[in-house]
Amino acid sequence: MNDYTLFLYPAAVAYHLAAVLSIQELIDRCNDYSRWIGGTILTGTLFVTLAIAGRWLTYGQGPFLTMYEVLISSLFSLSLIYGLAYAFVPITRIGAPFAAGTMLLLFFWAAETDPGIRLLPPTYETPWLWVHVIFGKLFLGCCLVATSLGVWLITPLKRFVRSVRYMWVPQQIERQVWIWLSIAFLFHSAMLIAGAVWAQDAWGRYWDWDPLETWAFITWLCMAIALHLRSVYHLGPRSLSLLAMGVFVLAFLTFFGVPFISINPHQGAV
Amino acid sequence: MSESTMITRASRLKPGGSGGQRGEGRLKWLRPVASLRITSLGLLLLGAGGVVASRQSDAGQWLIIVSLLLLAINLSAALLSSPLFRVRPALFGMHVGLLLLALALAYGQLSRFRGHFEITEGQEFDPRQVIVDRQAALPTALPLEAAFAQGAIKIDYAPGMMRRQTRSRVVLANNREWTASEGQPLIIDDYRFYVTHNKGFSALISWWPVQGGSPTHLGSLHFPSYPRLAPMQTLSWMAPDGTALTFEIRPTNIPQDDDWTLSGTMAEALLLVTLNGLTTRLQPGEAMRLPGGMFRFEGVKMWIGYRIFYDPSLYWCFASALIVICCLAVHLAGRYLRKPKTNITLADTGKVTI
Ligand code: HEM
C-alpha cells in the first residue's frame, strides 16, 4: 500500500461519522449536531486532499486518468461542494445522509480499485483539461446536492423526523432542487463546451458521438427537457425527485461507468 | 414577485401595451409553433439521433438534422412570439445564442472537409497528395502548394513503448517556424493539420534513365509505420523500368528500460536491396544499375502522417456557445439570486410564494 492511500481511511471514518450523526440529527429533538456534521465532512475533504496531493507528488501528475484517480478526485470535489453547501445553505442539510452515503460508496469503490498509475497522454497537457474537469466536478457536485434534496422529497423516513430545524415546507425543498439542477445544467454546458474545444485541438474533431460524449449529451438533454417541461406541467414532488435522481444516476454512470466499460472509450481515457 | 406569478403574468400580457407587446399580438398565430411541448419533443428526437449516431448509423445524422430543424423553427417562433422573452432579456439572449449555434453547426456540416496525407522530412506540402476523407458540400480550396516544408520529426517514448510528445517542425511559406504536436495543430488559412501517430522511416531515391540526362527525382519510399510494425521494415518497389526490388532498413534496437526519442537517426543509413534473391547493401550516395536505368540511394529520413480538418464555423460555434453560457448564467443569477421574501406565504392557489 502506498503512503498516500493511508489518508483515505481517516476520510472514510469522517464520512461514516457524518452519515451517523446526520441521521441522529434528524430524529433528535433537542441537540444540534450540524457543526459536527459539517466539520466531519470538511475534515474528510481535507484527508482526501492530502491523499491526492501525496499521489500527485509521488507520480508527478494529477488524478485525471484511471478509474482510481477519477474516483478519488470526485470524492474530493463532491465532499468539498457538499460540505460548503452544508455550511452555507442550511436547507441542504437534510440531504446529509444521502450525500455522506454517496461519499462512502465512492470510498469503498476506490478501495476496491487498482491504484496503479498510467502516464497521462500528451493531449492532456492543455489548460482546457482543467476547465473541462473543474466544470465537470462542479456539475456533479450540484447534482449531488439536488439529488440529496430530491430524495428527501419522497423518502418515507420523513415521518421519523423530530428536529424542528428539518421541517422544511416541501415547496422550499422543490425550489432548492430546481436551483441546484439549473446550476448543474450551467456547469454541464460549460463542461461540454470546454471538452469540445479540447477534443478539437487534441483529435481534430469537436464531437464524435463516442459513448462518453453521447451519454454526457443525454444527461444534458434530460436537464434541458426538464427545465422546459417545468413550465408546461407542474411537476409534483415525486416527479421532481425522480427527475433529480435520474439525472444523478445518468451523470454517475457517465462519469464512472461509460469510460471504463466501453469497448470504444473516449479517446481521452486511453 | 414569485417565479410562477411572474410567468403567469408574462404569458397573460395582452397586445396594446408597449410597442413590443403590440408586435407580439400580431404574431400570436405563431404561438402553437412555439409550444414548449414541441421543444421537448425536438430535444427527445435530438437525443435519439445522438444514440443512433453513436452506433455509426447514417440514420442518426438524419434524425439529428430533422430534430435541429424542428427546434430551430420552434425556437424562432418562440423568440418572435413569446412575451416571456421580452421580460427576461438574458433568457432571450441565451436562446438567440442557441439559434446561432444551430446555424453555425449547419454551416459547419456544409463546409467541413477532412483529408489525410503523409510527408517526409525536407518535402514540401503538395495538395495533390491529400487523400480526401470528406468532401465539403460548399466549395473549398486547399492551401497552396508549398504552404509549408516539413522539418525534423521527433517522437519521445517512455519505457514500455509509451508514446509521449510528437514534435514535428515545419517551416511556413513566410519562413516562420512552427512545431506541430499532439493538441497543437498547425493552422494555415483555417485548415488544421494534425500530426497522427502514423510515422516511420522513408528511403530517398533518385532515378537516372539509361539514356542519360538529368535524374528524375522520385522522392521518398515510405516503410511501414514504426515502431508499431518494427519487425516488418521492408517494402517492394517497382522501378520505372519495371524491375521489381525489395528494400529493407535496419533501425537500431529500441531501448526497453529508458526514455528514447524516435528520429531519422535511429535507422542505420543503410539500404538492403534484394534483386532476384541477391541482397546488396547501399550507403547514401551509392547507386545500383538496373536494365532500364540506375537508381541512387540518397539516405534515410522520417515520414509522418497528418490529418487535415477544415471547418470555418468553429469560431462561430465557440462564440455562440459562449453567448449561451453567459446569458444562462445571467438569467439564473437574476432568477435565483434575487433576495427572497423573508416570509413564506401560502397563496390562495395552494402554491407557495417564496
Ligand atoms: C437545446 C436547446 C435548448 C436549451 C438547452 C434550452 C434551455 C433553456 C433553459 C436553461 C431555460 C431556463 C429555464 C429556467 O429558467 O428554469 C429555458 C427556458 C425556456 N426555453 Fe429553452 N432551451 C432550448 C431550446 C428551446 C426552444 C427550441 C424553445 C422554443 C420554444 C425554447 C423556449 C423556452 C422558453 C419559452 C423558456 C421559458 C420557460 C419558462 O421559464 O417558463 N427553448 N430554456
Image (cartoon, rainbow, N blue to C red):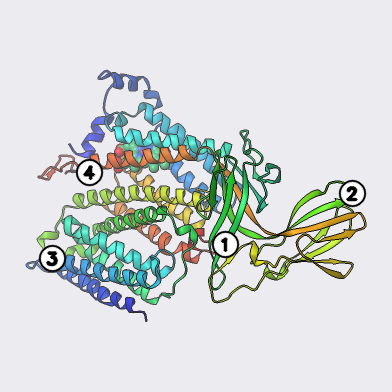
Which quadrant of the structure image shows residue B289? bottom right
Residue B316 placed where, x, y %? 46, 37
Give the quadrant of the N terminus of chain A.
bottom left
Measured in 3D between alpha carbons, the distance from the residue under mark 4 to the one under mark 1, in whole angstroms, is 52 Å
Which element carries disc 3, helix, strand or loop?
helix
Are the residues under badges 4 and 3 in a single subunit? no
Which residue type does callout 2 highlight? Gly
Q: Nearer the viewer, mark 2 or mark 1?
A: 2
Q: Nearer the viewer, mark 1 or mark 3?
A: 1
**In the rendered image, which residue does mark 3 sit on?**
A35
Which element carries disc 1, helix, strand or loop?
strand
Measured in 3D between alpha carbons, the distance from the residue under mark 4 to the one under mark 3, in whole angstroms, is 26 Å
Q: Nearer the viewer, mark 2 or mark 3?
A: 2
Measured in 3D between alpha carbons, the distance from the residue under mark 1 to the one under mark 3, in whole angstroms, is 55 Å
Which element carries disc 4, helix, strand or loop?
helix
Q: Which mark is residue B155?
A: 1
Are the residues under badges 2 and 1 in a single subunit? yes
Which quadrant of the structure image shows residue B310? top right
Upstream in sequence: badge 4 or badge 1:
1
**In the rendered image, which residue does mark 2 sit on?**
B212
